[in-house]
Image (cartoon, rainbow, N blue to C red):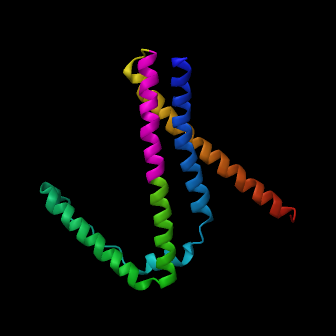
Amino acid sequence: MEMAIAIVGFLGGWLLVAGPIYQAATELGAEAVDRASISAAYEAVPAPAPDSPWWWLVPPVAMWRRQRISRAHHEAMLKVMTEEQVTQLLRFGAKATGWLIVALGAAFIAAKETWELVELLEWRTWTFFALVVAGVFAAVLFMTLRTRRDQQMIEQRSMIGL
């Protein structure tokens, strides 16, 4: 019975990873964002000049400079964007961040369940890492295949006029 519970926990953990990844792809794909006008606003703001790599000899200073340059570029972008574009971008970012947090939490649970299964079966440590990579791959593959299938169904229905 202990083995069955460990296997169910392992599978459940990875389903908890696949679910948020798929839901994020679905919701973010359907989010009403005027990507063309936001891209145009992005193109209207010149990219910041690259910082000298020599600054990385003093990493805290390099990070401070990079953050300052990034913040200035971000503020310049906000000045050329409309209020609606900013709202769309913030809403999209909030949803993406929320789903990322959920998926990451699920990945931690899945890793724990994977470790417990590997310990119970007395497998080598490398098996744990292989199973984690396989789990992430399977979750992303599921999301990719499912969203592609959904998109194909929508395209087929629109082509026949339904």
Most distant residue in the top direction: 122
| Quarter of the view holding residue 123 | top left
| Magenta stretch, main secondary structure class | helix
82 sits left or right of 161 in the view? left
| Quarter of the view holding residue 130 | top left
Give the magenta part as a residue range: 101-121
49 sits left or right of 20 in the view? left
Residue name at image x 44 percent, y 17 percent: 120
- Residue 60 visible to an observer of this rendering: yes
Is the residue 154 above or below the residue 20 in the image? below
Please state the horizontal and vertical placement of residue 1, each as a whole percent of the image. 55, 17
Residue 112 falls within the magenta-colored stretch: yes
Is the residue 14 above or below the residue 56 in the image? above
Number of on-image labels: 0
Is the residue 151 above or below the residue 113 in the image? below
Residue name at image x 51 percent, y 36 percent: 13
Name the one closer to the observer, 96 or 35.
Answer: 96
Please state the horizontal and vertical placement of residue 94, each as a whole percent of the image. 46, 65
Please state the horizontal and vertical placement of residue 75, each as a whole percent of the image. 34, 79
Name the quarter where the C terminus is drawn. Answer: bottom right
